[in-house]
């Protein structure tokens, strides 16, 4: 048996290690984050910009507390504002990342939340596409990595299933199956596989905070 066949055979019986983390907009103390570390959570993703067009002061404190507790992997996300009074995508990204810089914190990546098209996005898919592209380009222009949070249903409604202009960015897959698995993933938007999965929303954790659980292999 050739060596690569042996390796493939062995790999079938080696469980994939799941890196567990969470997001939450609820206030989280340093003590809470210490508890989460003890429970095996390794990353936190905090909402830095709200859909009403303002930065999230509460979650910024969460990010600081996560760092104090010893979390090494901290990301942020923006829930874009597309109401008439809202700023441009570029301005929203600038407000978000300037807020991060002014607060003296660091994040590894900024995720752009693309969900609930009937509530938060325009009916015009071309407009939404342009908005997302502008946001992605501005994040990178300001020197940070960027990713997309969405699923097939949201994507199809908001920008159209075949639009793949940001398929080279990591995908944080919204799939509330309750299980840590990519098995149900159906390709869309140019993505063949997700990079991480939000699998268990509104979880009442043993650390006293309601969270949305995510994982990646």
Image: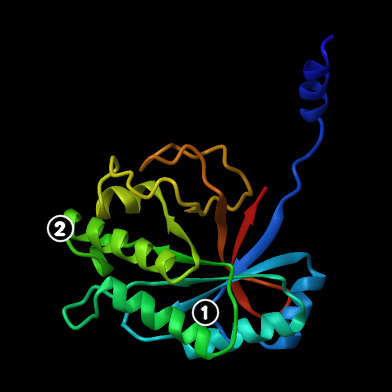
**Residue 53 visible in the snapshot:** yes
Q: Quadrant of residue 50?
A: bottom left
Q: Position of residue 70 (x, y in %)?
A: 77, 77
Q: Which residue is mark 2?
A: 124
Is 179 drawn above or below residue 66 in the view shown?
Answer: above
Q: Quadrant of residue 215?
A: bottom right
Q: Quadrant of residue 52?
A: bottom left
Q: Residue furthest top?
A: 1
**Residue 208 visible in the snapshot:** no
Q: Position of residue 143 (x, y in %)?
A: 48, 68
Q: Residue at x 69, y 59 (%)?
A: 20
Q: 82 or 110: which is nearer to us?
A: 110
Q: Position of residue 62 (x, y in %)?
A: 60, 84
Q: Which residue is mark 1?
A: 25
- Secondary structure beneath dot 1 equals loop
Q: Residue at x 23, y 80 (%)?
A: 86
């Amino acid at each position: 048996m050739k060596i690569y066949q042996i390796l493939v055979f062995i790999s079938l019986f080696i469980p994939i290690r799941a890196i567990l983390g969470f997001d939450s907009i609820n206030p989280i103390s340093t003590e809470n984050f210490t508890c989460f570390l003890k429970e095996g959570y390794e990353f936190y993703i905090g909402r830095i910009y709200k859909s009403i067009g303002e930065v999230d002061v509460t979650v910024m404190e969460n990010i600081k507390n996560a760092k104090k507790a010893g979390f090494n992997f901290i990301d942020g996300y923006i829930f874009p504002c597309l109401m008439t009074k809202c700023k441009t995508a570029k301005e929203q990204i600038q407000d978000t990342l300037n807020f991060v810089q002014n607060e003296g914190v660091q994040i590894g990546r900024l995720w752009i939340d693309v969900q609930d098209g009937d509530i938060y996005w325009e009916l015009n898919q071309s407009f939404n596409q342009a908005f997302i592209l502008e946001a992605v380009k501005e994040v990178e222009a300001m020197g940070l990595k960027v990713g997309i949070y969405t699923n097939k249903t949201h994507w199809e409604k908001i920008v159209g299933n075949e639009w793949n202009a940001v398929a080279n960015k990591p995908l944080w897959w919204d799939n509330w199956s309750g299980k840590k698995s990519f098995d149900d993933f159906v390709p869309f938007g140019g993505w063949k596989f997700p990079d991480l999965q939000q699998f268990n929303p509104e979880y009442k954790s043993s650390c006293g905070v309601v969270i949305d659980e995510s994982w990646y292999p």
